[in-house]
């Protein structure tokens, strides 16, 4: 088997791994794309009572098609409730009701800080990125944050060019010192492996099947810490893959 | 009132405008008329500039952008915006940048005529470093330090509704975003509606009213006025167009060709809809009606 | 869950509770059960204490009242409250007093987990003089001085809805007052509903949902649970009773007789409704249904 | 005629006089009782476009019966909109949309300050009154305030026992010095006459038919100023009375 390569794509593995981090009954602030797939995969498997909230205002969405934007009409039809964005950010997010926030980043650094604002100098950027959206407040207020990001030396610098969404800021005490209410990043899932945080610093805790520590080092902009209990990420099960490919993303938009 | 008259009367060069609607009910018909009337030096505010402001910026209408997320939702970057920021084409624009929560808070303060709004946000982020309008305030009860953002009070808000009466009492369902706050925060509000209904329809379900006629300066009847955005219960989002926009906006020539064919070349939204032709049927909404409620006593 | 169990589990002596509903949807069924279970030393919060808190106070359940208008709407004073304040009968109570706007702001801050809420109010009024919890704050942008009130975060909110599903997703129409803010501000929320409907009814009109199940600790099915208050679309306000209450509450004997007959003497709301008998038909709502909207795409 | 007394009650005159102060198209924050009658009378006569807002959240109400409370269901059915109390107080009232606010008071003093809180000392009141409700913010924020109050020496003291709702506070510059956004009390209508404000002080500007300056002095707790242009309040017209008695308050709850 291993010789003719894994029977699944990196995205599929990332989605499955993200889904496994979600507990039944949790309230998740969902992003579009892989996070949305991860949440719906979890609902189909071990977390049927997972509540999905989109920053657009849809609560308890039950989309009958794969939404390509967080404001898709399929997130409204047959949802449990639609709220104003004032309610979503004030009462749900700042109110402390969000257990898990999903974030993606163009850059993420060793302390889990995310950049989605600019590459280069803010005033004269090499590349102007979209900006925060709801990411800054999700990073600050959600109880736990999960990050899904493709990994490369450029996307994993020692320090991001701009902190859009704070992780552990400057290190272990970073969040506490600044009084950030949420718990901060819990796990970063890339195409190479999974990373957790110790003393506010990213640590490689599992390698995806077929990936090596060398690959990880080559694609990280600092001397990455490796967990002494480094494991191999569990491959997607046949059932996970079937639900993903046949039910959730039949047109293979994301997987 | 026609869209042409509404824009002539309530959108002037150099003014501050907000066209709201989070993915849903984004009034492209109004933006196209602003481009057609060649407004200049506008300060345009929106949580998500989206394709609608990419078009205004590429057409040279904008001097300053106040926003929180500048992308093409689900389809990549906004290239016209990037050209303006990175190369000053067709003109350089100033950016005033917040997060979504910050923009929501600014409009809420504006609607309530509060000079600022407090929120637990921005600690550890670089946003306050590049935006001096994000300050802090100390709670007089707990001594905690919170973030504060200033009120946003645009000259004119343009809000698209599914239905409104001739006095502008507007009802919106599906995603309601920050439309109510944007309308109350602005000096003038233009309500654009898919359907103009009799007052009795509005009165049959008062809890559905999001914007009261008393704050509305103009009412425009513009069916299909949101395409490529959508109107819940009327037509679907044209996701294909949003994806196509990636190519169009990436290439200045294609961008200008688009404006020629779909904006300058047309007199109004009516001609836009005619030009869409059968395309429209693909997007028409299927019926999925709510359980009616009793408002009697 | 029965009302008895809900009160046993979520309302304890000495706790801070809020039973909201502005004239509309005031859950008397919950108050009667609190009296029946002889709760003591409660801090009860409400914009308008109304007859419902007059009963709680006269029954000796209350140690402190947080409020903004203490009258019998359209029918005079609340005499049990006055006996407690003026003569300490059955026990003296502490008053913490705001205006409506102040109470709305306190609950909004509580719901948003802000420690305070700013408002343009109280300048020239004596309220800040007698309530040290009304402070001032200076805007970091304009330097203006505004009033500030502290967040209110009760232990338990009791909210009556026209319909809810078994998970507590609750839909309310007609006057919505501050119910949403009160529910989000509280550690526990008890949703009491005229009708328990299937989730599909809730999902058929998501914009109607005021309170999400995720913040609800208990769901109680209690038809006619608001009388003498009302439920839009279900039954009218019993204005005659509110007028009669003037006499009842004015006379301690009549007050206690009322509690004997209508609270202590009955096991639950079911017996209350039975005792009402045909009276109820007089109050039943006439149909006046809204125009349904399409939520499809 | 005059010998057998006026053919209308003091309440009817007060309602008509209040109605005449309302201009077409204005937005009025309505109270229950006489103010509600005055607004609906004005709508039937010179101000059909008057917009009624109740603090309970009903906007553009068109009640089919006489509401006895500001939260009456008849204010919701067939209204133009129902809003949360957060919206009513934040966006409508503080937002500056309310042209006219109606207030009543148990006590009103020479500067138009109103007391609805306590008679006597706050901590040990002789009489505990309902308190502010929305009155304090209406007095501070509405562009104009109209007061309807029965007049007696006790209800018209030189200084109220407690300022629930500020008028001109301490005199001419009172509101300006404190930065109150609204215009303050414009007219006080009692069972004896109408009072307007000059340099922040109450001035008798019109006497009701059959009433005398002496009566006014006897029922005022300070040396009340009399306008040099003192007039007689216009009596209710037959049409005003007909609408009031036959259409608006047929069961004579208030008139």
Image (cartoon, coloured by chain):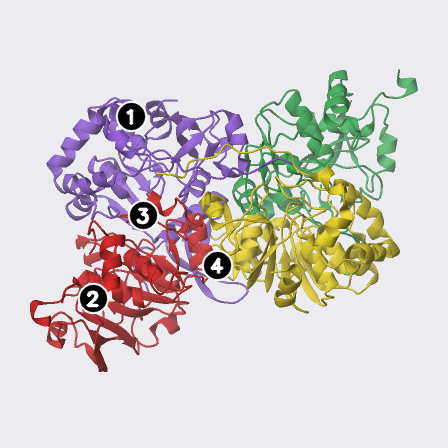
Chain colours: A red, B purple, C yellow, D green
Of tags 2 and 3, the one toward the viewer is 2
- Assess whether mark 2 and mark 4 are in contact (beta carbons under 8 angstroms): no
Q: What residue does disc 4 label?
A: C214
Residue occupying the far right of the picture: D3
Q: CA distance from mark 1 to mark 3?
A: 26 Å
Q: Give above or below for D86 relative to C252.
A: above
Same chain assignment for discs 4 and 2: no
Q: What residue does disc 2 label?
A: A190
Q: Give the image location of residue C193, x and y in percent.
A: 60, 51
Whether residue D206 is visible to the viewer of this picture, yes or no, is: no
Q: Residue at x 25, y 27 (%)?
A: B36
Of tags 4 and 1, the one toward the viewer is 4
Q: Chain of mark 3?
A: B
Label 1 neighbour load within 10 Å: few <14, some 14-19, many 20+: many
Same chain assignment for discs 2 and 3: no
Q: Quadrant of residue D245?
A: top right
Q: What residue does disc 1 label?
A: B269
């Amino acid at each position: 088997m291993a010789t003719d390569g894994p029977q699944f794509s990196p995205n599929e593995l990332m989605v499955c791994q993200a889904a496994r981090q979600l507990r039944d009954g949790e309230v998740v602030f969902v992003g579009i794309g892989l996070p949305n797939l991860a949440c719906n995969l979890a609902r189909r498997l071990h977390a049927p009572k997972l509540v999905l909230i989109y920053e657009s205002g849809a609560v308890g969405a039950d989309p009958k098609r794969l939404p390509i934007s967080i404001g898709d009409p399929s997130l409204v039809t047959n949802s449990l409730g639609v709220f104003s964005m004032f309610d979503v950010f004030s009462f749900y997010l700042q109110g402390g009701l969000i257990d898990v926030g999903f974030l993606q980043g163009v850059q993420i650094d060793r302390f889990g800080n995310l950049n989605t604002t600019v590459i280069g100098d803010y005033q004269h950027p090499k590349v102007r990125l979209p900006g925060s959206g709801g990411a800054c407040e999700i990073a600050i207020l959600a109880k736990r944050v999960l990050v899904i990001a493709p990994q490369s030396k450029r996307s994993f610098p020692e320090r991001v060019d701009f902190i859009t969404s704070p992780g552990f800021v400057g290190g272990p005490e970073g969040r506490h010192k600044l009084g950030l209410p949420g718990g901060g990043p819990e796990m970063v899932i890339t195409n190479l492996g999974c990373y957790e945080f110790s003393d506010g610093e990213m640590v490689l805790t599992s390698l995806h099947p077929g990936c090596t520590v060398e690959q990880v080092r080559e694609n990280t902009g600092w001397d990455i810490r490796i967990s002494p209990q480094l494991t191999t990420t569990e491959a997607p099960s046949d059932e996970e893959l079937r639900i993903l490919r046949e039910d959730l993303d039949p047109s293979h938009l994301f997987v | 009132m026609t869209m042409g008259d509404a824009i002539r009367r309530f959108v002037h060069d150099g003014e501050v405008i907000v066209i709201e609607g989070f993915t849903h009910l984004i009034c492209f018909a109004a933006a196209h008329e602003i481009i057609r009337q060649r407004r200049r030096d506008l300060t345009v505010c929106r949580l998500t500039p989206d394709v609608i402001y990419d078009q205004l910026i590429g057409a040279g209408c904008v001097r300053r952008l106040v926003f929180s997320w500048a992308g093409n939702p689900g389809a990549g970057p906004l290239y016209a915006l990037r050209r303006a920021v990175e190369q000053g084409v067709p003109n350089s624009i100033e950016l005033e940048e917040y997060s979504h929560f910050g923009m929501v808070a600014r409009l809420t303060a504006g609607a309530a005529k509060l000079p600022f709004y407090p929120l637990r946000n921005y600690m550890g982020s670089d946003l306050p470093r590049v935006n001096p309008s994000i300050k802090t305030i100390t709670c007089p009860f707990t001594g905690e330090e919170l973030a504060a953002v200033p009120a946003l009070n645009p000259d004119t808000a343009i809000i698209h509704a599914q239905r409104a009466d001739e006095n502008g009492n507007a009802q919106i369902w599906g995603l309601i975003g920050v439309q109510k706050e944007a309308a109350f925060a602005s000096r003038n509000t233009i309500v654009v509606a898919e359907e103009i209904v009799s007052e009795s329809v509005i009165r049959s379900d008062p809890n559905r009213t999001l914007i009261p006629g008393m704050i509305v300066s103009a009412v425009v009847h513009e069916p299909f006025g949101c395409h490529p955005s959508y109107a819940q219960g009327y037509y679907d989002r044209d996701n294909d167009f949003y994806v196509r926009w990636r190519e169009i906006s990436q290439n200045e020539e294609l961008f200008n060709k688009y404006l020629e064919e779909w904006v300058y070349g047309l007199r109004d939204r009516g001609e836009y809809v005619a030009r869409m032709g059968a395309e429209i049927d693909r997007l028409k909404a299927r019926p999925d009606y709510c359980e009616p409620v009793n408002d009697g006593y």
